[in-house]
Image (cartoon, grey):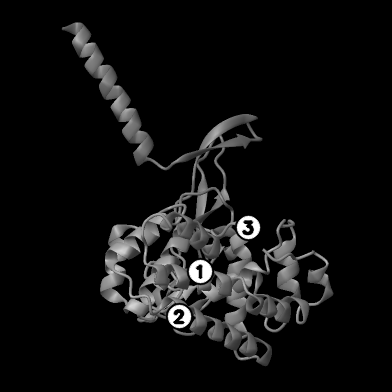
Amino acid sequence: MNKLLCCALVFLDISIKWTTQDTFPPKYLHYDPESSRQLMCDKCPPGTFLKQPCTARRKTVCAPCPEHYYTDTWHTSDECLYCSPVCKELQYVKQECSRTHNRVCECEEGRYLELEFCLKHRSCPPGFGVLHPDMTLCEEAFFRFAVPTKLTPNWLSVLVDNLPGTKVNAESVERIKQRHNSREQTFQLLKLWKHQNKDQDMVKKIIQDIDLCENSVRKHIGHMNLTFEQLLKLMESLPGKKVTTEDIEKTVKTCKSSEQLLKLLSLWRIKNGDQDTRKGLLHALKHLKTSHFPKTVMQSLKKTIRFLHSFTMYRLYRKLFLEMIGNQVQSLKISCL
């Protein structure tokens, strides 16, 4: 009985210690020069900054953040963070700045945030998925010409510095680096640059050529009118992570027949990072040859693949990278993929 009581008390003691650690302020290790000892000091709570660390004689001293500054976690910093500036065009304040929270901005209804722009939702355009905005097949094919076979560490910086027109700011570049792998970073940077400079003559022509390319792709793919079973078989034949049956069902219900395959290819690319859609389709064609897939569909897919790697895309590439950006980027030996 005494043994049982002893065990119960030990267990209770452990529970109390665990609860105490969770309840009281979290600690951090601090060297106290006065006592020459390592002390466990209290961290400062959200809304404050560390004014003075603890000593052997007193506890940690925390002070409130000044106006327009905040901290949102327990921490040991002697500075508060500056709240984000006012919300940008087409955004509203979802949560105002306070000592414990940063200002939170959100796009107006019907728009989504793409890097630093609030872009308008569309029902189901080519190259855009419901889950996440992506680039069109022609944009992807065009931008792939811009990615060197071997990426150098300073590639993105050189590209940022040499792109003409309005520059992509450092904050956006850093966000791109954090969210995307090295090869995908070029795609996202060029997409943002294109959007920022869409009213400039040099970019209007590129956008016009990409639109012509997209119209051609739609002609090749849009008339196929694939059944649900055919779409399912085609998506299963693509390499990498698969588009789910549920996504295919939603696409068939919400998109026009002429847009369904483009939407699903966009979703596949999102799931598979920097996969080359053109190469993915080539892989699919090899597998579909033995599955009695309609010949007309196979021919249309072959035409689309050839078109996305045609002279038209290389001409677009030359127009931007050889005529507009200049010798510095050329010197990096950009090679066509």
Residue 2 x, y percent position in the rendering: 19, 7
Q: CA distance from mark 1 to mark 3?
A: 29 Å
- Label 2 environment density (alpha carbons within 10 Å; few <14, some 14–19, many ≥20): some
Secondary structure found at label 3: helix
- Label 3 environment density (alpha carbons within 10 Å; few <14, some 14–19, many ≥20): some
* First in residue order: circle 1 vs circle 3: 3
Residue 226 x, y percent position in the rendering: 33, 71
Q: Quadrant of the N terminus?
A: top left
Query: Which marked residue is nearer to the observer: mark 1 or mark 3?
Result: 1
Residue 274 x, y percent position in the rendering: 55, 59
Secondary structure found at label 2: helix
Q: Amino acid at mark 2?
A: Arg
Residue 151 x, y percent position in the rendering: 71, 57
Along the line of sight, which residue is nearer the eye, 59 or 251?
Answer: 251
Is the Cβ of the residue at disc 1 closer than 8 Å to that at disc 3?
A: no
Task: Count the labels in the image.
Answer: 3
Dot label at residue 218: 2
Which residue appears farthest toward the top when viewing the image?
2
- Residue at 55% x, 82% y is 213
Dot label at residue 302: 1
Q: Amino acid at mark 3?
A: Ser
Instruction: Name the image quarter holding residue 249.
Output: bottom left
Secondary structure found at label 1: helix
- Residue at 75% x, 81% y is 324
